[in-house]
Amino acid sequence: MAAEHHHSHHHDQHGWVRAGGRRGRRLEPFLLLLVAEGEGHGCALIGRPNELGVAPEGVDVGMAYRTRRELETDGLLASEWVADGGAPRRAYAPTLQGRAALAEWAWLEARLEDMREELRRVEAAPAELSRSSTAGGSE
C-alpha cells in the first residue's frame, strides 16, 4: 500500500495567507518580519504583535511559536542550533522564499493603503455631490 501524503499547504497565490486561519491574516508576515529584523525569540514574538494589534484576539506564546514553526515547515524560515556561551537555542532567519514573501506582503500592504485612500475619497464624495445638487436646484 502506497504511503499517503497528509501534509498540504493552505496558501493562496501569495504564499503566506492561510485561508480560515485563526491567528489573523497579518501574524505570519509580521512574525517573518520580526525574525528578519533579528527578533525571533520570546517576548518580541508576543509583545510587538500585541502592541500593534496585529491579531485582534491577541497573540499568545503558543500561537507565536506554532506560527514560527509553520513558517519554517513552509520553507519561509530556516533555523539552526547555536550555543553562544549559553544554553543551545535555535536561531532563525528568513529564506530566499521568505524574503520574497515579505516583499510581496509589503507590495500588497501598499496596494491596500492605496485602496483605503480611494475609499476615503469615495466616502467623502456623496457629501460634496449632495451639496452641489441642492445648490443649483432642479426645475
Image (cartoon, rainbow, N blue to C red):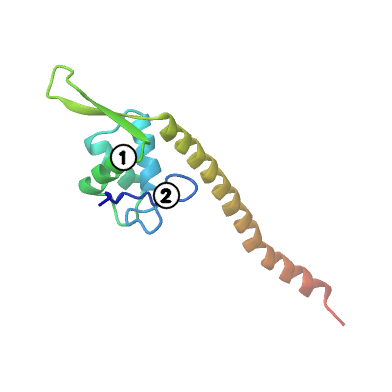
User: Can you see residue 47?
Assistant: no
- The image quadrant of residue 30 is top left
Residue with the mark numbered 1: 73
Label 1 residue SS: helix
Q: Amino acid at mark 2?
A: His
Q: Amino acid at mark 1?
A: Thr
Q: Mark 1: give few (<14), some (14-19) or many (20+) Cα within 10 Å.
A: few
Q: Which mark is residue 60?
A: none
Residue bearing the label numbered 2: 11
Q: Position of residue 13 (x, y in %)?
A: 50, 48
| Residue contact between numbered discs 1 and 2, judged by CB atoms under 8 Å | no
At label 2, counting other C-alpha atoms closer than 10 Å, the crowd grade (few under 14, some 14-19, many 20 or more) is: few
Asked if residue 109 lies left or right of residue 5, the reply is right
Residue 114 placement, left or right of 67: right
At 32% from the left edge and 28% from the top edge, which residue is drawn? Answer: 38
Residue at the image point whose x is 35% and y is 56% from the top: 21
Position of 135 relative to 6 (above/below): below
Which residue is rendered at x = 45% and y = 37% of the image?
Answer: 102
